[in-house]
Amino acid sequence: MLLIHIKSFRQQRLINKSLVLLLSITLTFTYSVLAETQLPPKDKIVIAGVKAKWWGPPAPFIHAKRGPGYALTTFIFDSLVWRDKAGEFSPLIADNWQINETQNTFSFNLNPKALWHDGTKLTADDVVFTIDYLQKQSYIFADVEAIKSVEAKNAHHVVIHTKKSFPAFMSNIAVSMPILPKHIYKDVKNPVKFVDAKAFIGSGPYRLKNYDRVNKSYVFNAFSDYHRGVPRVSEIAIQSVAPAAVMKVVKSTQTDLVTSVSPKQEEALKKAGFKLLSYSAIHPIRLKFNLNKPLFKDLSVRQAFAKGIDRQALIDKAYQKKAELWSAGALHTLAADKNDREIIQYDYDSNALKGVIPADMTLKLVTDKRIKKAAQVLVTQLKNAGVNVELLVTERGVANAMFRKGDYDLGLVTFTVLGDPIIFQQTATGKRIDGDNYLENQELTKLLKQQVNEIDPAKRAEMIRQASIIYAKEVPSVSLISTIRTVAYRPESLQLYWHGHGLGRGIPILLDKDFFAKPFRKHQ
């Protein structure tokens, strides 16, 4: 069987207008490469959710605040648009859309056949309501703060105005914001406690049949009146599976998709008839400094840590070589940035940390359980370099609480930087708890703020590049590595692909509803 490995690439096509024709040709070619024989309808797909703790009830506000919880919610709740195989925006609730030249007005024509699962028609009023509701009730995967106003021109035409030019609108809002049914949520005052059966009435291709918190399982049924057509797969069953039990489950039950595969399992799964797809998670692991402490206000100390960590050893020992070196410029892999000589990279120097930290000082390093192995390897390296470290591994929420209180010296953190480059501003100079909150360099702060509203692709690309150059020199945090993830699927049941943008605003997970719903069948 074939092992596909798709390398990381830059998160957004920031090109100037002279390259539009070339881009269209490239996309046409991409489509021809991605085209595959369409699979026939299938009664049931079984997914082994490896490492699946509890992803929560699949509805906005109540699912787990992690990518998988959002992914399952998209099975039930559609957004205005989605991404196709090539990673381009494609119709979902909206059939088509227009964006004005200054990119502050976005007009959507909705599919007139769109229905809520209870048979109620979906209209522009639902979109208006959703935005108004999210401006009062924040939702982690759709920040609508940039929106100034929204108006329904008629039942199927909605126009959204942003406060300023906002080139991230399509990737951060249109593709990620779940549209809510007004007739249900208008009476919901506290959505985080709304777990009634009506909470799962969406407009997406699947309806929730059952979810079991004890067994960590889900069953979804196709919505036969879906406006795009009848979904190909009639039922999707997801069952949590421990990593060590994967092969036992595969041998004992008909399993179509394994969501996480370890290097040791790859050959056995290929022999069992599975196809493997590996992709760059673009989820860098970073060493975070407590920049409020005098020690880490010293640039030479931060640079010493950047030089004194053997990142390749992290890959080899913690991830069995299934990871990539990350650029000091924060946004890309080292391979993607290596030809830009203005972005400083830090080669490993085993002596870089010698004598930098006083021998009588012990640094508290806080991390969460997701990256425990990397933390353990890192602590061993630091101790060997003469740095005394106390490691605290805890739940992600607890770790974030400690970061908020300043109860740490070092933090090992990881989150995706997929999606629009607006994530760079949120990571480096924004208020994200596990980000840098670095405001010492005024030029960096200015560039990252201005690029958010810059509509010229070439100018925006250069702003981001200049910010990466400054970031690499200043080292607000040390970018280390990003993992390579692998899934296994039966090609006779599913056709998987990785277009490089992730789900919604940039979630690096291969649980796209299109894998199961397409090709749609015509309604009888």
Image (cartoon, rainbow, N blue to C red):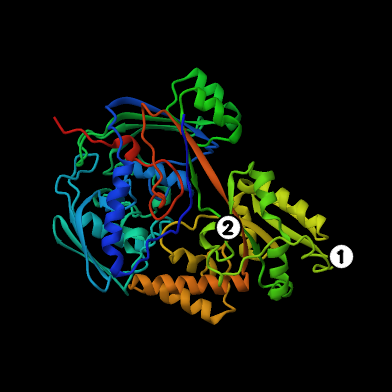
Q: Are marks 2 and 1 in contact (CB under 8 Å)?
A: no
For the question of whether residue 117 can be seen, the reply is yes
Asked whether 69 or 3 is in front, the reply is 3
The local crowd at label 2, few if under 14, some if 14 to 19, many if 20 or more residues have their Cα within 10 Å, is many
Residue found 63% across the figure and 62% down from its top:
403
Asked whether 183 or 302 is in front, the reply is 302
Task: Determine the image quadrant of residue 268.
Answer: top right
Q: Which residue is mark 1?
A: 359
CA gap, disc 2 to disc 1?
A: 30 Å
In the image, what residue type sits under mark 1?
Ala
Asked whether 473 or 99 is in front, the reply is 473
Q: Position of residue 88 (x, y in %)?
A: 31, 53
Q: Which residue is mark 2?
A: 326
Q: Position of residue 378 (x, y in %)?
A: 72, 53
Q: Position of residue 223 (x, y in %)?
A: 25, 35
Which of label 2 and label 1 is nearer to you?
A: 2
In the image, what residue type sits under mark 2?
Trp
Asked whether 426 or 148 is in front, the reply is 426
| Residue, far right | 360
Badge 1 element: loop
Task: Determine the image quadrant of residue 20.
Answer: bottom left
Q: Is residue 339 above or below residue 446?
A: above
